[in-house]
């Protein structure tokens, strides 16, 4: 049994609980996670979908420092990667994955060769494939539909709907 | 005349009409003919990054079959497909790369598209027009400049998909020079500024226009502070976020004055001495004409 003690600055005031059955923590109840070595289905799924290996990340933060959208994110991109390494499925609930617009700034900066944009896409896909669409064309006014370039509407729909 | 297959994409036919018209007119002067396939379809934007996604590679690959059709019927001279929109460029090129590097997906794509008469070979080369211009040679382009754009200080804005990811971008990811070289060839001054590769906010302009206005403001402010009186771009989405979105920027930053944003091809048309049917500045917001009149580059 391995115990992953999460950095206190990352998840504040975590209560360590001793129960083999608990594998994933939830932010609300502030529990610590523990799981057996080699058992991290969430990370495996993300790696599979993205074609990346998130374990390569050593938290240098280059992706976060270059990201143009961090002011709109609840967790920095590098923290999302750490969450995946730890198997924290809460990464799927973060605003970060929807804020990322795949500009690939992180991809060209990562010294470990991880394409973080691919990882973000994998997280989005996990949610979208359960048919949780983020946007709806009907929400746009006729004026907006007339004025916006198609490329904006199409890429928006492609990225944020299943 | 060298004939290239030209892939326009949706936006070039509507809000970015000025990009298309100015390009076709300018490159025609240089002896380049852009041949549009009869049956092109959506490029499939944005590139599907998930490793198991086959479906979203079909649209781009289908466009490449159109190139092979044109080549077989002798309507174009080579297997290169020229794009103008940075998003089309990125999506098509990446789909081509996936097709050629992933034999499993290649087979699936072939199986799904069994009704296409041509089985795509993977040989089509996707190019952005700027790459064609670079190959053509900046000194050769200079020969067509009738009216050097003296006094114009242009900030080259690349954005994201023209340069990234690595291996797809048209120029050095960290230190691009292709737009600068073109600007200089046209007789204008290229202004170096810090935000030329920063993302403009892309498709978030639909739901998060305040955020996009923030990002665009930073880009335009940097360009202005560096001394630019015009911003040039190669992407219809960047053009929208930097140009027409200035209305929103002014709401958030009342002190912001405006700076015109044009496509590189419009500057080419202007420098080549073409008329307003080729430059199509009336589609740009804010209007670039006043500054051009001020500099004596167009007559009132």
Image (cartoon, coloured by chain):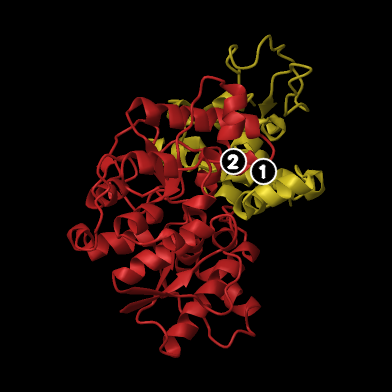
Chain colours: A yellow, B red
Neighbour tally class for label 2: few under 14, some 14-19, many 20 plus, Cα within 10 Å = many
Residue at 63% of width from left, 29% of height from top? B210
Per the image, label 1 sits on a secondary structure element best described as helix
Residue at 70% of width from left, 33% of height from top? A89
For this orientation, the residue located farthest to the bottom is B73
Picture coordinates of residue A82 (x, y %)?
A: 56, 28
**Residue toward you, A146 or A61:** A146
The answer to which image quadrant residue B289 occupies is top left
Q: Can residue B211 be seen in this view?
A: no
Q: In which quarter of the image is the N terminus of chain B?
A: bottom left
**Residue toward you, A117 or B90:** B90
**Distance Cα–Cα, label 1 vs label 2:** 6 Å
Subunit ID for the residue under disc 2: A
Q: As displayed, is residue B268 above or below residue B205? A: below
Subunit ID for the residue under disc 1: A
Picture coordinates of residue B24 (x, y %)?
A: 42, 67
Q: Do the residues labelled 1 and 2 touch (CB within 8 Å)?
A: yes
In the picture, measured across the screen, residue B235 lies left or right of residue B130, that is: right
For this orientation, the residue located farthest to the front is B300
The answer to which image quadrant residue B253 occupies is top right
The answer to which image quadrant residue B245 occupies is top right
The numbered dot on residue B136 is none
Picture coordinates of residue A35 (x, y %)?
A: 67, 29
Q: As displayed, is residue A82 above or below residue B71? A: above
Residue at 51% of width from left, 39% of height from top? B242
**Residue toward you, B53 or B4:** B4
Q: Is residue A108 visible?
A: yes
For this orientation, the residue located farthest to the top is A13
Per the image, label 2 sits on a secondary structure element best described as helix
In the picture, measured across the screen, residue B77 lies left or right of residue B160, that is: left
Q: Name the residue under label 1.
A: A124
Q: Mark 2 points at which residue?
A: A120
């Amino acid at each position: 049994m391995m115990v992953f003690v999460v950095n206190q600055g990352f998840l504040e005031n975590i209560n360590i609980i001793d129960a083999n059955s608990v594998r994933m923590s939830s932010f609300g109840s502030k529990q610590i996670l523990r799981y057996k070595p080699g058992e991290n289905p969430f990370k495996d799924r993300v790696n599979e979908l993205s074609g990346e290996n998130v374990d390569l990340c050593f938290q240098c933060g280059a992706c976060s420092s270059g990201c143009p959208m961090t002011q709109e994110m609840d967790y920095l991109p590098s923290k999302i990667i750490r969450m995946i390494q730890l198997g924290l499925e809460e990464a799927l609930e973060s605003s970060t994955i929807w804020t990322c617009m795949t500009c690939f700034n992180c991809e060209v900066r990562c010294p470990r060769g991880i394409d973080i944009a691919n990882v973000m896409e994998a997280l989005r896909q996990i949610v979208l494939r359960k048919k949780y669409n983020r946007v709806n064309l009907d929400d746009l006014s006729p004026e907006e539909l007339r004025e916006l370039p198609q490329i904006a509407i199409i890429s928006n729909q492609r990225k944020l709907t299943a | 005349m060298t004939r290239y297959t030209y892939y326009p994409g949706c936006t070039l036919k509507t809000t970015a009409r000025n990009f298309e018209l100015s390009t076709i007119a300018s490159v025609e002067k240089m002896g380049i003919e852009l041949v549009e396939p009869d049956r092109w379809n959506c490029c499939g934007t944005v590139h599907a990054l998930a490793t198991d996604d086959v479906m979203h590679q079909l649209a781009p690959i289908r466009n490449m079959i159109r190139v092979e059709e044109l080549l077989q019927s002798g309507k174009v001279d080579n297997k290169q497909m020229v794009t103008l929109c940075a998003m089309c460029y990125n999506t098509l090129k990446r789909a081509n790369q996936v097709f050629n590097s992933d034999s499993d997906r290649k087979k699936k794509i072939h199986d799904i598209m069994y009704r296409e008469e041509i089985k795509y070979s993977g040989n089509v080369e996707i190019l952005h027009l700027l790459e064609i211009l670079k190959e053509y040679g900046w000194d050769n382009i200079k020969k067509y400049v009738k009216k050097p754009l003296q006094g114009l200080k242009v900030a080259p804005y690349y954005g994201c998909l023209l340069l990234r990811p690595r291996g797809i971008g048209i120029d050095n990811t960290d230190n691009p020079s292709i737009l600068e070289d073109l600007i200089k060839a046209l007789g204008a001054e290229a202004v170096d500024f810090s935000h030329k590769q920063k993302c403009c906010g892309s498709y978030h302009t639909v739901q998060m226009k305040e955020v996009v206005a923030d990002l665009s403001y930073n880009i335009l402010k940097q360009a202005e502070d560096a001394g630019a009186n015009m911003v040039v771009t190669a992407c219809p989405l960047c053009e929208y976020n930097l140009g027409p979105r200035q209305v929103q920027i002014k709401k958030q930053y009342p002190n912001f004055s405006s700076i015109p944003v044009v496509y590189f091809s419009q500057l080419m048309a202007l420098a080549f001495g073409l008329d307003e049917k080729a430059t199509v500045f009336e589609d740009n917001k804010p209007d670039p004409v006043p500054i051009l009149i001020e500099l004596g580059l167009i007559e009132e």
